[in-house]
Image: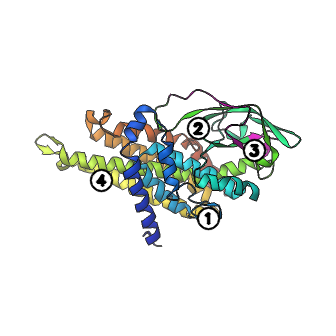
């Protein structure tokens, strides 16, 4: 058991940290304030191989593993949580096409996605089905060599800006076995977008409803076979949950650094804050929780890379633990700053708003508990 990063992993992490420091951190507050989607900066990440991190290299991907992805998103989120999270979603979409689509679709779309000539969105959630994703209603009815799509998807990151939408639709019976996955390009007739959502956080990426009204796409745009879409969506979410957990981890790390800097400078009761034992204990607890979360995340990523039987369980466990810990650490860092932490002059309130949603999306943390308990207890069922 070796907990040290390889030289390659260390170089990858350093590269992502430099990009975060140079391209994300200086602008994060302004992007948040103006709800600006920095597509130009996001596309720069593709030049470093960050648009297809675990996509195969024959279509322009970096061919790395989930541990390396965790290192990258942890580093990127120290610069801007919201922007790092969008890059994570794009990577999930790219991987799903690379992993499950026909060779024709792989060659058509993956090179454009890994270069970010196209950016992408993942469309699973609907206005009436969030945690109960298998209850989705958006239909794709076959008409010759085409599918006709009708329905809506909700809370879609990149909606209206992304060039390609990977969409879970109902092609058959109720439940997960009736769900398929299709690809829809932005300018397809019948595809439209709702107004931008006014959100608490994640303001550097647009979020809106995606509508399909008699939207026709080629049957050739189906990923895999009919009825396989829910499995593809869940497998995509295993990695997506790790990436979002990594975004929480990196944000928490940045918050802890800010808290340490503030405690070293701020004086109260005749002492610097870092000389007060109560605050020393708080900082020690924050650091301990951060390291526990980091080890757990890397272990889950290793299991997903190695396709262990319990990988899905560990992805759910890590997502729940790391995003909860990340929020608590950021909140404690804000509390340590006192009233200043509540001001937009400091980054803590933005960090808090951004990490809060990580406990909800990619499967709410309550659903992570369902996944873990169901998997853990099934061996005891008669």
Q: Is residue 281 above or below residue 148?
A: below
Q: Residue at horizontal 70%, vertical 51%?
A: 232
Q: Give the CA distance from mark 4 to mark 1.
A: 42 Å
Query: Quick one: SS at disc 2?
Result: loop
Disc 2/disc 3 C-alpha distance (Å):
29 Å
Q: Is residue 305 above or below residue 190?
A: below
Badge 4, how many Cα within 10 Å: few under 14, some, many 20+?
few
Indicate which label's residue lies in the foreground, 1 or 3.
Answer: 1
CB within 8 Å, label 2 to label 3: no
Q: Residue furthest right?
A: 144
Element type at mark 4: helix
Q: CA distance from mark 4 to mark 2?
A: 43 Å
**Which numbered disc, 3 or 4, marks the residue that appears first in the sequence?**
3
At 56% from the left and 57% from the top, the residue drawn is 314
Residue at 81% x, 40% y: name it: 147
Q: Any mark on residue 284, and which? A: 4
Residue 22 visible here: yes
Within 10 Å of disc 3 (Cα), the crowding (few <14, some 14-19, many 20+) is: some
Which image quadrant for residue 10?
A: bottom left
Label 2, on which residue?
Answer: 161
The residue to which callout 1 is attached is 57
Badge nearest the viewer, 4 or 1: 1
Say which label, 4 or 1, has the lower sequence index. Answer: 1
Residue 78: say if magenta.
no
């Amino acid at each position: 058991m070796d907990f040290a990063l390889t030289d390659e992993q260390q170089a990858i992490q350093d590269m992502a940290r430099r990009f975060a420091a140079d391209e994300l951190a200086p602008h994060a507050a302004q992007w948040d304030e103006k709800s600006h989607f920095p597509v130009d900066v996001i596309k720069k990440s593709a030049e470093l191989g960050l648009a297809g991190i675990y996509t195969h290299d024959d279509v322009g991907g970096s061919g790395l593993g989930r541990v390396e992805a965790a290192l990258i998103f942890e580093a990127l989120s120290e610069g801007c949580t919201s922007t790092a999270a969008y890059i994570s979603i794009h990577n999930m979409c790219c991987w799903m096409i690379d992993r499950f689509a026909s060779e024709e679709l792989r060659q058509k779309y993956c090179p454009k996605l890994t270069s970010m000539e196209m950016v992408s969105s993942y469309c699973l959630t609907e206005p009436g089905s969030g945690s109960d994703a298998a209850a989705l209603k958006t239909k794709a009815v076959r008409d010759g060599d085409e599918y006709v799509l009708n329905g809506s998807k909700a809370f879609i990151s990149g909606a209206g800006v992304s060039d390609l939408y990977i969409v879970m639709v109902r092609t058959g019976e109720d439940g997960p076995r009736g769900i398929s996955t299709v690809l829809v390009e932005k300018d397809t007739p019948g595809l439209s977008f709702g107004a931008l959502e006014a959100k608490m956080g994640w303001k550097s990426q647009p979020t809106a409803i995606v509508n399909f009204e008699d939207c026709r796409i080629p049957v050739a745009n189906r990923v895999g076979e009919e009825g396989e879409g829910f499995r593809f969506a869940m497998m995509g979410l295993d990695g997506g949950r790790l990436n979002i957990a990594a975004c929480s981890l990196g944000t928490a790390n940045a918050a802890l650094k800010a808290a340490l800097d503030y405690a070293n400078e701020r004086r109260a009761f005749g002492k610097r804050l870092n000389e007060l034992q109560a605050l020393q204990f708080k900082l020690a607890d924050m650091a301990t929780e951060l390291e526990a979360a980091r080890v757990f995340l890397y272990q889950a990523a290793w299991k997903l890379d190695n396709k262990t039987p319990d990988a899905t369980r560990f992805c759910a466990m890590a997502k729940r633990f790391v995003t909860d810990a990340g929020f608590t650490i950021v909140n404690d860092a804000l509390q340590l700053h006192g009233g200043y932490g509540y001001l937009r002059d400091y980054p803590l309130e933005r960090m808090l708003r951004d990490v809060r949603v990580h406990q909800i999306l990619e499967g709410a943390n309550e659903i992570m508990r369902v996944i873990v308990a169901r998997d853990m207890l099934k061996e005891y069922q008669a």
